[in-house]
Amino acid sequence: MLRKELTSIFDWVLLVPMLLLVTISIVALNSAGFDIYTQESDRVYITQFIAAIFGLVSLVLIMIVDYTKFRKYAYWIYGFGCLLVIITLVFGQRIRGVKGWLAIGGHSVQFSEFMKIAVIIMLARYLENRAKEINTVFDLIVPGIIVGVPFLMILMQPDLGTALVFIPIIIFMLIIDDADISLIISVVSIALIGVSIPVYVTYSSHVSPAALPPLAVFFSKTNNLLLMALIASVLIIGTIVIHNIKKIRLNEIFMRVFIVVIFASLLAAVFDTILQPYQQMRLVVAVNPEKLPDELQRGEAYNIIQSMIAFGSGGFFGQGYMHGTQSQLGFLPEQETDFIISVIGEEFGWFGILIVCVLFLIIFLRLVYIINNAKDMFGALIVSGILGMFLFHFLINIGMALGMMPATGIPLPFISRGGTSLVMSMTALGIAMNIESRRFVNL
């Protein structure tokens, strides 16, 4: 006898918080799109509502299919996703400097959102039978290629925010796959170093020399060897500690350090070459935005400064629905997408932000529960990738709005304006619900 009927297989612990977040999105977008001068709305909330309907349909359809079938079609799903990204790269329309959308039927579709799910499924397919076998740097070659191909293609659009999401996806999946901890540290180090170098160089070129650290004069675009040597020294000390704890041979540890330095340098060079100057500046404006030159405070740093003002003016309970000064008077740019949480903070205060955070926390904890109770490694790996994706979006978007993270254009799942993002986010949770429900029943 089936433990659950078809009509009751939904994971309500995931579904209810998701629907509440979507409701908050529609309410916030109605306010963000309202013009106080014309007393008219741009009606973007209606578009978001329609996208939510499509998202629910996608969620239901994805739950009908046994998720284990994704294993059989993983290569096709991944290849199809790469093809869509290539088509977008060639024929896509450029919005805010990023060629990441394809016009279909009068609507703009961002296929890189689908690519996130495709990468998660493909990685799960590869890592499933290699639990505890990812122990050397050479074991990372294939996972690196799986992530690296779409990473570079999306970075060429150039969409830095979406490209960076693949890093926490692979890290979370390697953790669940019980990969060697020092390898995971190596991946994290490559990402942090590769991003930090161009950020530091760009920042140092836009502030007065007196405001820079003493050794900043050595860190230029043509001479990063000293910085790399300093980082390598820190890594070497860390690897010696790992050697004493994990009993890994020193020659392998030093090989890992060498590879980290090389790949981090290549990643930094890619960022410096592909990203436009204004995109590089988005990475640095979060570093003391108030201390940047006036032209930057009125330019790239303007969004973050206005967002921080919105949070500050909201107080604990906010200024009231559709009564936010920053959002209603048009001082807050990108308030329907990147800084939608700032609108919520200004109108509903920290109390409103707390509600949003609690709803996300419930989703995160439930995903952890599903990972721990999945009936197979394939399902656990997929949900871990979904968790890494959502957690990264959440932390970066809210940190960006608070002036603590770089402005990378990463949307807040279920809340920021964006039909493709909303549909794919709801589809991802549908996959997680599918994996949870299959523990009890085969449909």
Image (tube, rainbow, N blue to C red):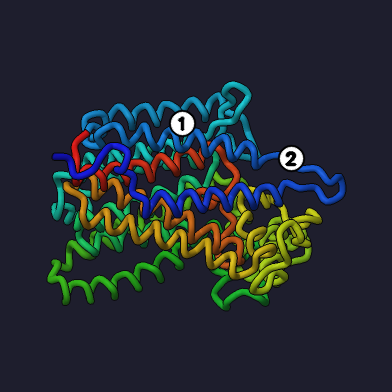
Label 2 crowd bin: few (<14), some (14–19), many (20+), radius 10 Å:
few
Q: Secondary structure at mark 2?
A: loop
Q: Residue at x 71, y 52 (%)?
A: 333
Residue 382: % across, % down: 29, 46
- Given residues 97 and 369, the one toward you in this image is 369
Please tell me which residue is depicted at 41% across the width and 49% down the height of the picture. 15
User: Relative to 201, does residue 414 appear above or below in the rendering?
Assistant: above
| Residue 133 can be seen, yes or no | yes
Residue underneath mark 1:
85
The residue wearing badge 2 is 42
Residue at the image point whose x is 56% and y is 49% from the top: 23
Asked if the residues shown at circle 2 and circle 1 are in contact, with their CB atoms under 8 angstroms apart, the answer is no
Q: Tell whether 424 sits left or right of 3.
A: right
Spatial CA span between label 2 and label 1 = 30 Å
Q: Which residue is drawn at the image coordinates 55% and 41% (left, top)?
A: 158
Q: Name the disc covering residue 381, or none.
A: none
46 and 221: which is toward the camera: 46
Look at label 1 and name its amino acid: Val
